[in-house]
């Protein structure tokens, strides 16, 4: 069962990993004259990057969920078809068994003295 999920999710793994670990703006080396404004600008840039990464992750998760829903729908349709075929096969087996029993009974009656 786990192998089935891996085959469904495998094409999306590189994108998920790429989006899950965004490369954030690095803090410059501390300079003695670096002011609070420069630090606030850096924090603002990092916040924007985090928001973009979260937005991209949400989009990717939405696409993955839509594809998973399509897969589940296809599996349900396939299961319904298989069930109908199984019912038809069971009915055919019952009819064949009934005909065979009747044929055996008719043969036994015809051979009886």
Image (cartoon, rainbow, N blue to C red):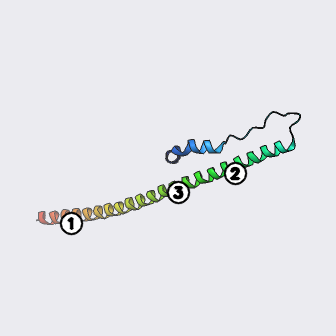
Disc ID at residue 102 = 1
Instruction: Examine the rendering and report whether any part of residue 39 can be seen.
Output: yes
Q: Tell me the mark number nearer the camera, choosing from 2 and 1.
A: 2
Decide: is 64 above or below 92.
above
Decide: is 97 above or below 64.
below
- Disc 2 is placed on an element classified as helix
Assess disc 1: are there few (<14), some (14-19) or many (≥20) residues with their C-alpha within 10 Å of its C-alpha.
few
Disc ID at residue 79 = none
Specify which label sits upstream in the sequence, 2 or 1.
2
Q: Is label 1 in contact with label 3 (beta carbons under 8 Å)? A: no
Assign the C terminus to one quadrant of the image: bottom left
Residue under the image location 45 percent in, 56 percent down = 75
Assess disc 2: are there few (<14), some (14-19) or many (≥20) residues with their C-alpha within 10 Å of its C-alpha.
few
Provide the residue designation for mark 2. 51
- Disc 3 is placed on an element classified as helix
Q: Is label 2 in contact with label 1 (beta carbons under 8 Å)? A: no
Q: CA distance from mark 1 to mark 3?
A: 54 Å
């Amino acid at each position: 069962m786990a192998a089935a999920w891996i085959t469904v999710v495998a094409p999306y793994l590189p994108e998920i990993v790429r989006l899950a670990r965004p490369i954030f703006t690095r803090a410059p080396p501390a300079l003695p004259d670096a002011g609070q404004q420069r630090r606030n600008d850096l924090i603002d840039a990092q916040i924007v990057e985090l928001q973009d990464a979260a937005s991209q992750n949400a989009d990717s998760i939405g696409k993955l969920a839509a594809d998973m829903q399509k897969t589940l729908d296809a599996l349900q349709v396939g299961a319904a078809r298989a069930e109908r075929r199984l019912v038809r096969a069971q009915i055919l087996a019952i009819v064949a068994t009934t005909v065979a029993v009747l044929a055996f009974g008719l043969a036994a009656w015809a051979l009886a003295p």
